[in-house]
Image: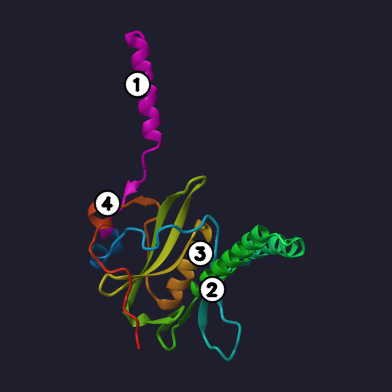
Amino acid sequence: MSFPELFIVMGIIKNLFYKFQDQREVLDLTSFGDELAFKTSWNPLAPGGTNFCTHELQKSTSPLSGDLLIFKTTALAILFSASFILMGLAVFIPGISSGEDAERIIGLVFVGGGCWISWGMKRQESVFDRSSRRLAKGDKTYDLEQVCAIQLIREYVSAKETRYYSYELNLVCIDGERVNIIDHGSLRAIRKDAETLADYLSIPVWDAIDFKIPKQAAHRDVKSEISELP
């Protein structure tokens, strides 16, 4: 290969490498106007996530429950878990008739997987009550008086056969610790829900999704969540 040809090839490789680099601007933590941003980790709190919207914020429609905001499992997420259960039943039921143990086992695995996914989605639901200043998520409750901001960050998820961005909505507490609320793949939904929740709690949104996280900010030594309250 001649020198001009080698120069061209090196230029192509350099351009390809440049395209795959993170071209976002570096996040300026001073833009949030709060020293707490420097005490907070900007690494993903809930590694993994999904490539679709699993939970959306809804206002309570019951007059008995009061002024609540609830992150409910979406119809798409319910359908996703139900598809595993239906596929499992489609294999398990014929397996009973034919007496095939393998089919029954495979069917039960799919049914169990679907039930596990559904249970996990349900546990991720959270209820915000600003009258009592309490957050209930799963079997835990948190004091909303300790919450100072909403953090939005993104994570690039690379699995064996799929790659996508998943977005986190985390609560930032007064000591810099965080509580993960949702983690899914819909940027539009998570930003909309973050603004609604911020208005409800009268706290700011720290949106870092469109920025590159500086290394010194990403690796702060903080706990992953606040303590459970009695």
Rendered image: mark on residue 33 = none
- Mark 2 and mark 3 lie on one chain; the one further toward the N terminus is 2
Which amino acid type is marked by label 4? Answer: Pro
Q: Which residue is found at the position 53% from the left and 62% from the top?
A: 189
Secondary structure under tag 4 reads loop
- Magenta residues, start to end: 1-30
User: Real-space Cα distance between discs 1 and 2?
Assistant: 52 Å
Image quadrant assignment for residue 61: bottom right
Disc nearest the viewer among 1 and 4? 1
* Residue 72 horizontal/vertical position (percent): 55, 73
Q: Measured along the vertical axis of the image, is residue 88 above or below residue 211? A: below
Task: Decide if residue 25 is in sight here.
Answer: yes
Q: Which residue is found at the position 28% from the left and 56% from the top?
A: 218
CA neighbours of label 3 inside 10 A, class few (<14), some (14 to 19), many (20+):
few
Residue at numbered disc 4: 214
134 or 96: which is nearer to us?
A: 96
Residue 60 as seen in the image, left or right of residue 97: left
Which amino acid type is marked by label 1? Answer: Met
User: Real-space Cα distance between discs 4 and 3?
Assistant: 26 Å
